[in-house]
Amino acid sequence: MKHTIWLMETVGLSAHKCGALIRRFGSAKAACEASLREVQQVCLLSLRQRRAFEKKSFAEADRILGQCRAQNIEIITLEDPRYPPRLKTIYDPPAALYLRGKLPEFAKPWIAIVGQRKATPYGLDAAERMAYELSGCGFIVVSGMAEGIDSAAHRGALKGGSPTVAVFGTAIDKCYPAFNAGLMRQILHNGAILSEYPPGKRGSPGYFPQRNRIISGLCVGTVIAEAKKKSGSLITAGLALDQGRDVFAVPGDINASSCEGTNNLIKQGEAKLVTAAADIAAEYSGLYRLQEIRPRTLSAVYESRQPVPQPQPAADEERDEILAAIGSGAHIDEICERSGLDATSVMSRLTMLELSGRVRQLPGKYFEKI
């Protein structure tokens, strides 16, 4: 456990590189004890990473372990039998997951419900209704506890009776947005909170798109309840497709910009149109023992919320730096190597470029300019 944290937080390896080393050497401990030359044969390290690897200082890892013990936070590594089996199959599963609460059964179907933060009453109603009905028939609803669709999905799931799982894009001990502290407590009472970021970790806008791969990777399918043309939830849909997961979308008003993203997913054949939880349950009824759907009428009146601060776009020179590193097309590891930036910084910039329509993500974490 300590060695995995050291590789991630002290050496600063990406989840993919950390996983590659663990697979190559059999354990994180063995990877730490390997020579730098042996490690470099598996994955290239930057100068800073090479120096940290050779220094072998475990002070930061010990500090994180102490914080987790003090705050009753569990750590689940790739080597732990409790690690979510479905998540382990994605390209870059987190080498360590920080857990609060209790993980639900993996034998049940896990389904993600996500969408935009500035959601309409229509989108909020659809998300909460579907989450309620899916939870009631045995699904584990997963989302990101953000404002809007995510929060509605968690509320519906809690009312449905099954546990729900929130995946943070922040440190495991930070509630974001802060006004969801009450919802977080309810989730911890009947479900779990996960993050790949240890307690006390400073936040970054790039952490949110990074966590989306965990939301989709945990689940058999992802439901996009409502999304504009350039909503970040469309990136989650793309990640789900890349991971071989099912994608569903709730159709909306063809004249409303708030539904343009979901309608396009359906039109392009990237998502199956769903108008009720029963449509989703029917896809998995032959694979899982599900209970009968309990329909429910939900109010379309929701409390007003303060807007969540949105990630700021990277400066022009930062975007140009990433575009230059992509060249005619490159893998995420190549982009990091060419730009000299860490994976978090690169993913943050790539996300902004993708949302602005200047970069396209291809299967296997390859990117190309548009």
Image (cartoon, grey):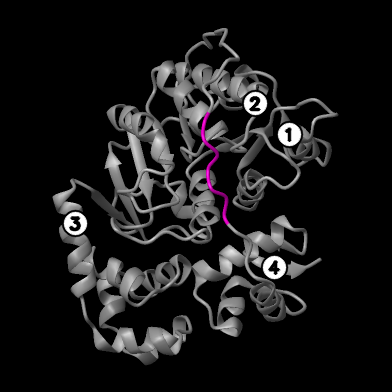
Residue 148 image-quadrant placement = top right
**Which residue is denoted by mark 2 in the rendering?**
123
**Which residue is denoted by mark 1 in the rendering?**
258
Q: Tell me the CA gap for discs 4 and 2.
A: 31 Å
**Where's residue 106, x and y in %?**
39, 36
**Where's residue 322, x and y in %?**
66, 75
Identify which amino acid the numbered label 3 is placed on. Gln
Predominant secondary structure, magenta span = loop
Identify which amino acid the numbered label 4 is placed on. Phe
Earlier sequence position, callout 4 versus callout 1: 1
Earlier sequence position, callout 4 versus callout 2: 2
**Which residue is denoted by mark 4 in the rendering?**
367
Residue 223 image-quadrant placement = top right
Q: Nearer the viewer, residue 112 or 316?
A: 316
**Which residue is denoted by mark 3 in the rendering?**
67
Q: Tell me the CA gap for discs 4 and 1.
A: 27 Å
Report the magenta residues as a range.
Answer: 305-311
Question: Which quadrant: the N terminus?
Answer: bottom left
Q: Nearer the viewer, mark 4 or mark 3?
A: 3
Callouts 3 and 1 close, C-beta under 8 Å: no
Callouts 2 and 1 close, C-beta under 8 Å: yes
Mark 4 lies on a secondary structure that is: strand
Q: Which mark is residue 113?
A: none
